Amino acid sequence: MPSLSVDQFVDLPRFLTVLPVYNESQHIAPVLDQVSRHASDVLVVDDGSDDGSSELLRRRSDIDVVFHPQNRGYGAALLTAFDYAIVHRYDVVVTIDCDGQHEPQRIAQLVAGCECADIVSGSRYLDQHAPASQAPADRRKINQQVTAELNRRLGLDLTDAFCGFKAYRTQSLAQLDLTETGYAMPLELWVQAAWHQLQILEVSVPLIYLDQDRSFGGALDSASTRMNYYREVIDRAIRACCEKPALLEAGGRLCAVPAWPCR
């Protein structure tokens, strides 16, 4: 796709591009160099890195950085970023990983999609004919299983539940009450998005895996443990929504959520 520079964003809403970082010293410089060419406002949330990433970030003057003194988790880094975007009144917040697996030149496409959707989510599996890297087998299988489960239980139509390349309307994020701090936070987000009946648009993005052996860390390196954790978060998020009062339309009528699994 054609590459857009920062000065071509005059017709886009005011957006913040966010990168959660934990021990990404190998990728920080090239990824941020690329992101800065395609986004004027960039925030990095350093989630307690101890590999020199923090020092590299402190040397840059073209980005803002929030430092977590200790590692709190992928979800916690995103929650910090969402709060920042809301407080600073951005119209849209884009999330992009710092491991080189996403293409920053697509940022404008995701932002533009927020004109018609609350969440624009990259999907590595939407275009079945696109050339792609080979995802690790256990990750692809879990993604398929979790995506199918979310679709079945929530009435969604997703093809990729876990892609970290997304754009959100900030006012829509402000409706959510996200609490999960780990890797499964996006699953809690999907549950709450369905509950609030947010408009979701998937756009095709390339499947790029630069590190087939990349670790989740600790027990989550076990595929079965990871799957159990994901299902636990989904179940907990659904229960939490079912305990809330029913949604109301402007006229005060109860608003049914399609296929909502409270029973």
Image (spheres, grey):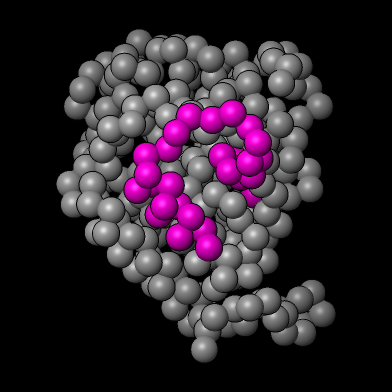
Q: Is residue 131 magenta?
A: yes
Residue 165 placement (x, y as % from top left):
54, 37
Residue 12 placement (x, y as % from top left):
76, 30
Question: In the figure, 23 relative to 156: above or below?
Answer: above
Residue at the (68%, 76%) spot, across then down: 258
222 lies left or right of 31 = left
Q: Which residue is more in the foreground, 135 or 162?
A: 135
Q: Residue furthest bottom?
A: 263
Question: In the figure, 33 relative to 23: above or below?
Answer: above
Residue at the (51%, 52%) spot, across then down: 161
Residue at the (34%, 27%) spot, across then down: 211
Q: Is residue 140 magenta?
A: yes
Q: Determine the image quadrant of residue 157.
A: bottom right
Q: Which residues are magenta?
A: 119-148
Q: Which residue is more in the foreground, 231 or 86?
A: 231
132 lies left or right of 22 = right
Residue 151 placement (x, y as % from top left):
58, 65
